[in-house]
Amino acid sequence: MISPSEKLPLSIQPDQLLIRRMRDADVPGIMEIESVSFGSHHWSEESFINEMKNYLARYYSLVDKRDSRLIGYCGFWAVFDEAHVTTVAVRPEYRRNALGEVQLIHMMDQCMGQTIRWMTLEVRTSNYGAQNLYYKYGFSSAGTRPKYYQDNEEDALIMTTPDINSEPYRKLYRKNKEALIDRIGGFPEGMGS
């Protein structure tokens, strides 16, 4: 376990990355990551193209600035006062570099100060790594969706935040965000500090 004061040995540095709105040209790279991350029951190219046209949806791509390679992507739907996280994924060879956390922070930054008060998501009951990240950012368990995942009928844990615009939540968020900056040395271009 890396202590918060140690820098992560990143395979890519934050200043080599860009996070921006997802584009149609990103879809081939997304499909590569989808198939290795989610198996045969992943979203289709058409699903992503349609999602980018959906006025409720916000999707972002994490790109290596050196060669324009897609490293990861994330997205959510904003409906009234809730953001529902629909996807977070990182190319396998770049995992364990805090890039999932970087993308979660980016989505939260997009939601804070807006009309959005809560964030929700589903996560596999067996995905303890992702659950621990979400717990760290104040998500709590709100129930399960039985047999939610089609590939193996695994249950999904429903997780939700408290009011993300409340002062207690913002304090937790700032603490975690500052600790991540210390660990990785900054954020990708396109993110606030």
Image: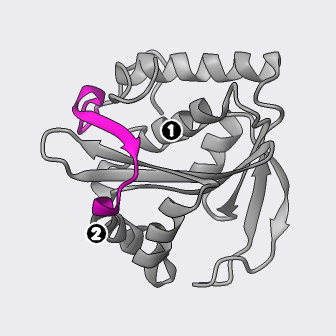
Which residue position is annotated with label 1? 101
| The magenta stretch spans residue 179 | no
Identify the residue shown where x is 38% and y is 41%. Answer: 20
- Range drawn in magenta: 10-26
| The magenta stretch spans residue 12 | yes
Looking at the image, residue 24 sits to the left or right of residue 105; the answer is left
**Which structural element holds mark 2?**
helix
Identify the residue shown where x is 74% and y is 73%. Answer: 155
Identify the residue shown where x is 75% and y is 41%. Answer: 139
Q: Which amino acid does label 2 sit on?
A: Pro
Q: Residue 117 carries which label?
A: none
Precedes in sequence: disc 2 or disc 1: 2
The answer to whether any part of residue 128 appears in the image is: no
In this rendering, the answer to whether 120 lies above or below 144 is above
**Which structural element holds mark 1?**
helix
Work out whether residue 29 or residue 169 is closer to the camera in this orientation and state it: 29
Q: Which amino acid does label 1 sit on?
A: Glu
Looking at the image, residue 171 sits to the left or right of residue 167; the answer is left
Q: In which quarter of the image is residue 111?
A: top right
Q: In which quarter of the image is residue 148?
A: bottom right
Q: Residue 28 carries which label?
A: 2
In this rendering, the answer to whether 124 lies above or below 175 is below
Q: Where is residue 192 in the image (x, y as percent from the top left)?
A: 46, 21
Work out whether residue 3 or residue 118 is closer to the camera in this orientation and state it: 118
